Amino acid sequence: MSAASGATGGRTASIVDDVQRELLQEYPEDTPVAACYHLTWPDQKIYRGVLKDLAKIVHDNHLTLTTMLVVGEAIDNRQGLSELYSKHFTHLFRKGDDEQPS
């Protein structure tokens, strides 16, 4: 993935200092980022911030091998967590439960 394209992309957090330094050469320091820990696991956590703080976010929260870094404007285009796997969500392959979560 080339940062020069300005595309949103994902990387693992194992080399976050180098990744941040490389991305700052192509993206503005206020580019939205998300450090996504244990995605789809029960203990999933998503830490949001800006590129200039990416390494600090990862280090301060002790994020490791099971962390994916997402960088780009697409991060700010939605709110909340995905409902794709919610039993209440209807999609092409499943009709959701009509009862909404409380």
Image (tube, helix red, strand yellow):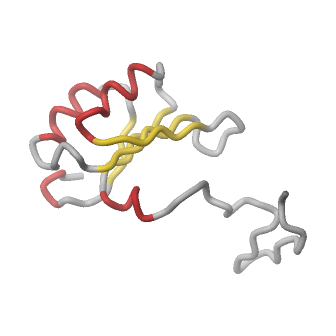
Residue depicted at x 58% and y 36%: 38
Report the side of 4 relative to 62 (left or right): left
Does residue 16 sit above or below 83 in this rendering?
above
| Observer-nearest of 89 and 15 | 89
Front position in the image: 88 or 95: 88
**Residue 2 position (above or below residue 66):** below
Q: Position of residue 14 (x, y in %)?
A: 37, 26
In the rendered picture of this protein, how many numbered marks are placed on residues?
0
Q: Residue at x 40, y 27 (%)?
A: 58
Q: Quadrant of the C terminus?
A: bottom right
Determine whether, in the image, residue 95 is placed left or right of residue 10: right
Work out whether residue 76 or residue 42 is closer to the camera in this orientation and state it: 76
Q: Point out the residue furthest to the front here.
A: 102
Residue projecting furthest to the bottom: 92
Q: Quadrant of residue 21?
A: top left
Tell me the residue at 12%/55% (across/down): 4
Task: Please give the name of the residue rendered at 19% of the width and 59% of the height, measured from the top-left corner.
Answer: 6
> Is residue 23 placed above or below 6 in the rendered structure?
above
**Quarter of the rendering containing residue 68:** top left
Residue 32: image x %, image y %?
A: 32, 49
Q: Residue furthest left?
A: 25
Give x and y (percent) for residue 30: 23, 46
Q: Position of residue 61 (x, y in %)?
A: 47, 22
Q: Is residue 66 above or below residue 77?
A: above
